[in-house]
Image (spheres, rainbow, N blue to C red):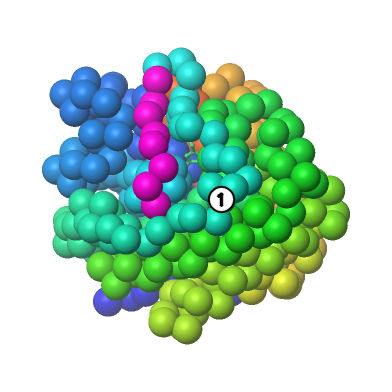
Amino acid sequence: MAERKLLEVLKGRTAFPPPVWLMRQAGRYLPEYREARRKAGSFLDLCYNPDFAVEVTLQPIRRFGFDAAILFSDILVVPHALGRDLRFEEGLGPLMTPIGAEEAVALSMDGFHEHLKPVYETVRRLRQELPEEAALIGFCGAPWTVATYMIAGRGTADQAPARLFSYRHPEALSRLLDDIAAASADYLIRQIDEGADAVQIFDSWAGVLDEKSFDRWCIRPVAEIVRRVRQKHPTTPIIGFPKGAGWLYRRYRRETGVKGLGLDWTVPLDEAGRLQMEGAVQGNLDPMRLVAGGKALSEGVKSIMSALSGGPFIFNLGHGITPETPVEHVQAMINQVREEQSWQPT
Ligand code: CP3
């Protein structure tokens, strides 16, 4: 079998047209997802039931033929498996009991893998059911991003509670991130054991950290995950997505050792091109261009393709697709990425 395109690119080769997949490609913008979600009951029931999780992971592959599927789950199943409570409320997103500085030292791995067994089964079944040419991406949240939800107990606009915690209780945060990193590495290793071809580490809140904090709370724990996963699976590519890292993207790749770099939409394309000289980049269409469609969409796709399709590149959004995205816009975007020849490198 020829190697899956996404994996080729993550090894530094150029593929044309580039592989394409979207963060949150299984989700509420799809009528078939909303239907499955209704049947499953809660969002967490969907995550922990392999029949449903396999089904919703495959939905966007069937509909659009993406080059990669991403396991359907959530980054917060890791703290959940570490014994923290978790629920999702319509319109509010995730809710947890905020963790205090004293508790942050007492996370236990007892029952961790047992709790996540349905996720491992989902991965195993997905690798069997996916088309040969589609890559399967496993994932986890980066320790900092996971911790922001554990500390605030909910999503916030700027993660002020977690930032404050980091200055008031650096030792407690350090231990908390060490525990999350160790658990997340084990979790990724198990996903790869079951058939994940590549893994992505989502650090959606990397961009709220100042330089020193970025080194300490973003780079250091992610480097530890990479080191542990590599020890067990040296050839499985790891994609890092430190959203909002700006000037620190380059340092992030060099110091964590991730192969692929997920770029948010604020990264200028000439800078993206420079980052691409050190390895594969993924991104970075503004999800709102996809909602808007028309010229906003086609111009966005065109400039990204012109700038990046001549090197190792994975077409994606700069963050997750949003529920109000019209399904036809997604198809139009894929067609443009796959058909347009004008940016073909000569
Ligand atoms: O990309 C995929 O298709 C795989 C599945 C996936 C989900 N969440 C499903 C989901 C992945 C990779 C995630 C990651 C995730 N989860 C992140 C990092 C990436 C990012 O988007 O920033 C974060 C911060 C979370 C935590 C989380 N989960 C939040 C803040 C929310 C609420 C926001 C919302 O859109 O409602 C979720 C819920 C969630 N995770 C949904 C999905 C499909 C929506 C739940 C529903 O169906 O009601």
Report the span colored magenta. 82-89
The image shows residue 3 at horizontal and vertical percentages of 37, 74
Quarter of the picture holding the C terminus = bottom right
- The relative height of residue 40 versus residue 81 in the rendered view (above or below) is above
Q: Which residue is most to the front? A: 102
Q: Residue at x 30, y 34 (%)?
A: 44
Magenta segment, prevailing SS (helix, strand or loop) = loop
Q: Residues within 10 Å of mark 1 (few under 14, many from 20)?
A: many
**Residue 1 relative to residue 259: left or right:** left
Please name the residue that numbered disc 1 is placed on.
104
Q: Residue at x 59, y 41 (%)?
A: 100
Quadrant location, ligand no. 1: top left
The image shows residue 152 at horizontal and vertical percentages of 60, 32
**Is 83 covered by the magenta stretch?**
yes
Task: Label 1: state its secondary structure.
Answer: helix
Q: Residue at x 66, y 53 (%)?
A: 173
Nearer the observer, 14 or 80:
80
Query: What's the amino acid at mark 1?
Result: Ala
